[in-house]
Amino acid sequence: MTTHPELAEPWAPEGMEVQEYVRLLGANRQICTLSLWHRLGLARGQKLRLLADMLMGSDAVRTYWTHFGELRAEEAAADRTQQRFNAVMHDAFVARPETEPVGV
């Protein structure tokens, strides 16, 4: 994707401001980087949990996960490595005091 609003505009979800979408694309880039580290074996176990928690310290990452976490889970349906990564990210998401309780 892109950080240029004029290029991101056609891809922005309906009802979301383009600037907000661009901000969330930056968060997605950070999550994708950590996902790649996990896939390559560079971030596993406690290190992965620590890095996921650090990412979830960002409002942009938490907002991204609120909007797109479920989509990431659907995309990972046949990929056990990605499922494990998403589970760690989700755990870090719900553990943050800034996160609204899930299902409420």
Image (spheres, rainbow, N blue to C red):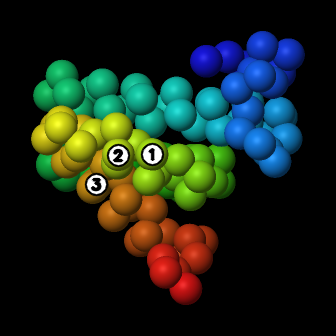
Where residue 74 appears, as percent x and y from the top left, is: 35, 46
Disc number for residue 74: 2
Q: CA distance from mark 1 to mark 3?
A: 16 Å
Disc number for residue 71: 1
The residue drawn where x is 20% and y is 27% is 39
Secondary element under disc 3, as helix, strand or loop, is: helix
Query: In which quarter of the view is residue 13 placed?
Result: top right
Q: Amino acid at mark 2?
A: Glu
> Which numbered disc, 3 or 2, marks the residue closer to the eye?
2
Q: Amino acid at mark 3?
A: Val
In this rendered view, identify the residue nearer to me: 103 or 61. Answer: 103
The residue drawn where x is 18% and y is 38% is 78
The residue drawn where x is 34% and y is 38% is 75
Look at the numbered discs 3 and 2 and tell me whether their residues touch, using CB distance below 8 Å. Answer: no
Where residue 31 appears, as percent x and y from the top left, is: 44, 36
Quarter of the figure that contains the C terminus:
bottom right
> Does 74 sit above or below residue 99?
above
State whether residue 58 appears in this view.
no
Look at the numbered discs 1 and 3 and tell me whether their residues touch, using CB distance below 8 Å. Answer: no
Q: Identify the residue position indicated by label 3 in the image.
A: 88
Q: Earlier in the sequence, mark 3 or mark 2?
A: 2
